[in-house]
Amino acid sequence: MGIFKKLFGGTSASQPSGPIFPGESFSILKLNFPDGWGLATVNKAYDNYPNKSLYPWHVFIEIEVIDKNENGHPTSSEAEKLNKIEEDIEKLLKQNQTVHFVARIIRNGFRELLYYIDQPRLKQSDVSTFCDNVMKERRINFSIREDAEWKSVGFIK
C-alpha cells in the first residue's frame, strides 16, 4: 500500500493527515459590527489545517447575553454563566462526535461559538432538551450545516 501512496500521492480522504487536533494558538481580534464592536477569540492553529474535509459539519451556537455592560458585552458574573453553558455544550457535542472548537465571538448582546465536527450524531431530543433548559433563562440558537471548506469561519485560512 505504501508504494501506491507514493505513486498516486496523498493520503486517503478518510484518514487524517497529521494530528487530528492541531493544538492551540489563540488570537484575539477586534471586530466591528453595525451595532458596535466585538471580540473574537480564534484558534489560529487551525490555519491551513489539512483535515478540514474530515470535519465538514459547522456547528454554530448563539447565546443571548443578559447581564451586559454598556458595550453589550457580558459582565463578569454573566461571563461565568456563559462559560458554564459553553462547557455543557461541549459535553453534549463530544458525546458522539469529534469536536473542533474554532472560535468564540462576543458582540453586542450575544456570545457565538463556532465548532466543526465529523458527523452530526446528536439526537434531536437531546439538543431540544438542552436548548429548552437554556431558554428558561435566555435565548439560544443552535444550528448545524455542512461546510467542508470551513468558509463559515472567516478568521481561519
Image (cartoon, rainbow, N blue to C red):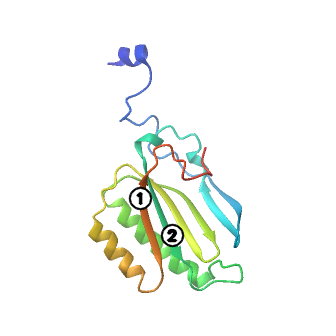
The residue lying toward the viewer, choosing from 144 and 7, is: 144
Identify the residue shown where x is 45% and y is 86%.
137
**Left or right of 5: which side holds 31?**
right
Q: Local crowd at mark 2 within 10 Å, few (<14), some, or many (≥20)?
A: some
- State the CA–CA distance, disc 2 to disc 1: 12 Å
Q: Position of residue 17 (x, y in %)?
A: 45, 34
**Where 1 sits versus 94, above or below?**
above
Picture coordinates of residue 54 (x, y %)? 41, 42
Amino acid type at image mark 1: Ile
- The residue sitting at the front extreme is 34
Local secondary structure at mark 1: strand
Q: Residue at x 55, y 48 (%)?
A: 151
Q: Is residue 2 above or below residue 47?
A: above
Question: Residue drawn at (52%, 64%), measured in percent from left and top?
Answer: 113
Quarter of the image containing the N terminus? Answer: top left
Quadrant (top left/top right/bottom left/bottom right) for the C terminus: top right
Residue 88 higher or lower than 69, as above or below: above
Residue 144: quadrant of the picture: bottom left
Above or below — where is 71 with respect to 93?
below
- Give the residue number, with chain letter if any, for mark 2: 62
At label 1, counting other C-alpha atoms closer than 10 Å, the crowd grade (few under 14, some 14-19, many 20 or more) is some
Q: Secondary structure at mark 2?
A: strand
- Can you identify the residue that label 1 sits on? 144
Q: Amino acid at mark 2?
A: Glu
